[in-house]
Image (cartoon, rainbow, N blue to C red):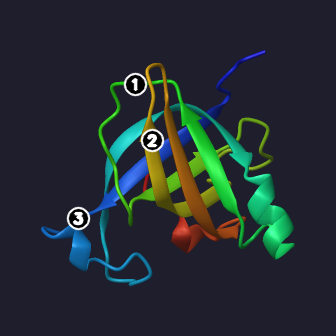
Amino acid sequence: MNRYPHTVLIQKPDDADLTQSNPWDEDVHYVDVYKGKCRCYLNAQSRFRTNKVMDSDFCVTIPDPTMIDIGENFKVCVKYPDSPSKNNWNVIGYVKDFVRYDRNCLIHFQVIKENMIAEDMPAK
C-alpha cells in the first residue's frame, strides 16, 4: 500500500504583503508554491467538537523535509486517488498551523467546504 497516496497542492496569495491579504476575499490571486504526495486525514477532535465535517480541521503529512516554509492564508488543496471525479480537488482549506520535523512536514488546515464547485478549483 502506498504510504502517501494523496496529492497536495499548496498556493500562496500573490500579494506583496501577506499579512494584508484576506483568504476569503474573492479578489485574491494565488500562485503555486508546492505540489507533491501526501497523506490527508480528518482531525477527529475537531469533528467531535463541531459534529460537522465541513467545519472541521484536516491534517496533511508531507514526506518532504525540504519543503518551503508556509504560513497562514496559504491555500491547501488535496486530491484523493479513489475519487470518482479525477479532475476535482476533494478538500480545500486554509493553513492554520505548519510544523517541520526531521523526515516530514505536518500541516493543519481548516476546510471551507467539501466537494468544491468548478469555480473554486485551482487552475492546474
Residue 37: horizontal and vertical position, in percent? 55, 29
Which secondary structure, mark 2? strand
Tell me the amino acid under the disc marked 3: Asp
Residue 7, given in percent of the width and then of the height, sits at: 58, 37
Residue 26 position by quadrant: bottom left
The reply to whether residue 122 is visible in this rendering is: no
At 64% from the left and 71% from the top, the residue drawn is 117
Q: If you read the primary sequence from the N terminus, does the residue marked by circle 1 or circle 3 appear first? A: 3
| Label 3 – label 2 distance at C-alpha | 23 Å
Residues packed near mark 3 inside 10 Å, few (<14), some (14 to 19) or many (20 plus): few
Verify CB contact (< 8 Å) between mark 1 and mark 2: no
Left or right, 29 with reference to 88: left
SS state under label 3: loop
Amino acid residing under circle 2: Val
Q: Position of residue 84 (x, y in %)?
A: 80, 47
Q: Is residue 85 visible?
A: yes
Which residue is disc 3 drawn over? 14
Q: In this figure, which residue is indicated by the disc labeled 2? A: 99
Q: Which residue is mark 1?
A: 65
Mark 1 or mark 3, which is nearer to you? 1
Residue shown at the point (59%, 42%) measured from the top left: 60
Residue at position x 43%, y 20% in the image: 102
For the residues labelled 1 and 2, the Cα–Cα distance comes to 10 Å
Instruction: Describe residue 33's horizontal placement relative to residue 45 as left or right.
Output: left
The front one of 29 and 59 is 59
Above or below for 83 versus 37: below
Q: Nearer the viewer, mark 3 or mark 2?
A: 2
Q: Nearer the viewer, residue 35 or 71?
A: 71
Work out which quarter of the rendered image holds the N terminus and state it.
top right
